[in-house]
Amino acid sequence: GQRLGYPPNIYLDQLNGTYNREGLAYQDMAIHIFKRDDNLYSISQTYNVCVEDLLAANPNLVDSMPTGYPTFIPNTRPCYDEASGQQLIYEDENGYALEDPQISDQLMYYGNQPLGHISHYYNVCQNRIEDANSEKMNHRSTYLGWVIPTDRPDCFDEDGDLINYVCYDNPVDMTVDYRGADDFPTVNPDGVDCYDLADPYTRIWYEGEAYQIMDYEKEKILASRAFTAWCYGVSLDAIDAINNEQVILDLLPFHHRLIPEATRECYIDHPELLNYFTVHQVERYETLLGIAHQYDILPQWIAQANNLDGDNMIWERQMLIIPDGMRLSHIFAIFMSVMALFITALLFYRLRRRPTPKKKRQNN
C-alpha cells in the first residue's frame, strides 16, 4: 500500500522542465474506495488533498473514475484551510512559491488536463468553467490554473450523464401558476436557482408564459413542429416563437424543443387517446389529396383537423385524424335530392299558376 511521495512543487517543476526523480521515497497512504456518487473534488475535500495530488498518486483516474476503484490518498501539503474550508494557495500567478500560503477566495485547479476532464473532476459543466475563465479563454491572462466556479449545480448525475437545468434569478415554486402575475419568473442562464429538466414537474417560465420541454428524438414523427402542435393541442406559432429565442436555444439539449403547456396528452405517450377517432397512417408516396379521396372528404378538412402547415405537408408514418361526419358522396346525394325536390316544387308551382282554358260555347 505504499506509493512514491512527490514533492509539493512537482507540477511546476514539470512545467519548467526541472523535475528530478532522485530523492523520492515511498510512504504509507490511506485508501479510499471510489463510490458511485464520488468525484475527485469531493474526495479531495474529505482528505484535504488537492485534486492535482490525487491525480499524481492515481494516474488511472485522469480519464475515468470507476466505482469500486481503490484511490490512494497521498501525504502532501493541505489543500484547504481548516477554519474556512477555502483553498490554500502556495504559488503566485507566475508559479513562484509564496513565503506563506494564502487563502484563496476562489477554487483553483493547477493541472494541464483538458477542460472536459476537469469538468468531471469537479462536477461542474465545462461552459461554466469557461465563463469563470473568460479572460484566460480570450488569452488576456496568463495565470496558471483554472478558476472552478462553486455556485453552480452538479453537472453530472451518479451515472456520469449530463444533467440539463433551467435556471432563474430567484427560487421558483413549480406548483404556482405565475401567468398574469407582476413578478413572474423568467429564464436566466446565469441564475443560481436551477431545476432539473428531467423532473416532470419542472416548468420553464419565459416572459410570463409557462413551457414544457419535449424530446422529439424518441419519436421521429414528432420532429415536425406542426405535428407536435396538433398532438399536444397547442399553437404552432407559439412553438415557432419560443424556439427562435436565443436564450432558449442556449438552454435546450440536443433534439429538444419547448412547447407551450399542453392542453392534452399526446397520443405518442397515450395511444388510447385515438380509440374514438378514425386515424390514417401515411404510407410512402401518399398525398393529402389521395388520402382525402380515399375517405371521400375534402383535403382541407384533414388539414384543419390535423393543424397542418400552410403547405399541407405530410410525411411517412404520420398519423392523421380523419374528420368524422358527412362524406362528399353523401353531401352530393343530399344536394341532388334537394335539387330534385326544388325542381319538383318549381314544376308543381308553375302548373298551379297556369290559367285554366275557357270552354267553347256550343250552338245547337
Image (cartoon, rainbow, N blue to C red):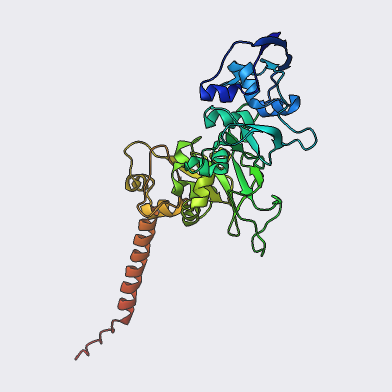
- Up-down: is 92 above or below 320? above
Q: Quadrant of the N terminus?
A: top right
Extreme residue toward the front, this view: 99
| 158 relative position to 288: left or right | right
Q: Is residue 33 visible?
A: yes
Q: Residue at x 68, y 39 (%)?
A: 104
Image coordinates of residue 226 in percent, x first then y, are 44, 49
| 94 relative position to 237: left or right | right
Image coordinates of residue 169 in percent, x first then y, are 65, 53
Which of 164/8 is in front? Answer: 8
Image coordinates of residue 48 in percent, x first then y, are 74, 26
| 137 relative position to 52: left or right | left
Q: How many marks?
A: 0
Q: Residue at x 34, y 64 (%)?
A: 340
- Up-down: is 261 above or below 197? below
Q: Quadrant of the C terminus?
A: bottom left
Q: Is residue 274 visible?
A: no
Which of 93/32 is in front? Answer: 93
Q: Residue at x 71, y 54 (%)?
A: 176
Image coordinates of residue 252 in percent, x first then y, are 53, 43
- Up-down: is 147 above or below 34? below
